[in-house]
Amino acid sequence: MTIRSADVWRACRFAGLTAWVCFLAGCVDESTTGDKTTFTFSVWVPLAVVLGSIAATAVGAAVRTRNKRLGYVLLIGGPVALIVVAPGIFLDRVDIDRNQLTVRTGFWFMPNVQEIDLRHVKTIEVVAEQRRTRRGTRTDYKLIFHTADGSARTVSAGDLLKQSLPKITTIAHEQGIEVVDRTGT
């Protein structure tokens, strides 16, 4: 079976259009059960990674005779993304209620779960740190939870935590927790 370049470009245009429509639909889903609110990635996000991984593998197989480096990068990268990245995106979540914030991120086989007991938090700082990268300046956000005993816990604010920030702020104000915005915006 021969894959023509016109077919590849047609598939790429379709994939791009589909990704754009999904992007407009939103990346994060919010659901509430009782007083617990959960933020997860929309189901299309990990499915897009799965489809992209499969497409990368197929394109890698077709391209490797003309461009070995690109072909083998796609042949190896596709399955790695399928096995390592996609399941982690399915499992990422932020759960928040009056008493606790739980953030689960990372790979499916090595998750990073951070639990913050909000009953002991006195102040939440929202901090923005700029750092230089090869492509310019990047801003990373983090939340610092200061407790009554003087200790502090830092949680890096990924996409899900950024989307849940208004809910965290609302619950913090209801609980009498001061929220300090140090993002400079």
Image: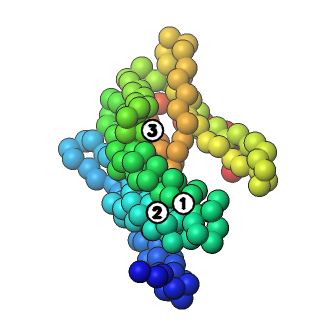
Mark with earlier residue (1, 2): 2
| Residue 141 shows up from this direction | yes
Q: Mark 3 points at which residue?
A: 106
The extreme bottom residue here reads 6
3D distance between C-alphas at marks 3 and 1: 23 Å
- The residue depicted at 31 percent of the width and 37 percent of the height is 97
Position of 142 relative to 65 (above/below): above
Q: What x and y, as percent, mark residue 82? A: 41, 53
Q: Which mark is residue 74?
A: 1
Name the amino acid type tagged 1.
Answer: Leu
Mark 3 secondary-structure assignment: strand
- The residue depicted at 32 percent of the width and 34 percent of the height is 98
Q: What x and y, as percent, mark residue 51? A: 40, 65
Name the amino acid type tagged 3.
Answer: Gly
Tell whether 44 sits left or right of 127.
left
- The crowding category of the residue bearing disc 1, from other C-alpha atoms within 10 Å (few below 14, some 14 to 19, many at least 20), is many
Q: Name the residue under label 2.
A: 57
Q: Quadrant of the N terminus?
A: bottom left
Q: Which mark is residue 63?
A: none
Q: Are marks 3 and 1 in contact (CB under 8 Å)?
A: no
- The crowding category of the residue bearing disc 2, from other C-alpha atoms within 10 Å (few below 14, some 14 to 19, many at least 20), is many
Q: What x and y, as percent, mark residue 144? A: 56, 29
Mark 2 secondary-structure assignment: helix
- The residue depicted at 49 percent of the width and 15 percent of the height is 148
Foreground: disc 3 or disc 1 = 1
Position of 34 relative to 15 (above/below): above
Name the amino acid type tagged 2.
Answer: Thr
| Residue 176 shows up from this direction | no
Mark 1 secondary-structure assignment: helix
Q: Are marks 1 and 2 in contact (CB under 8 Å)?
A: yes
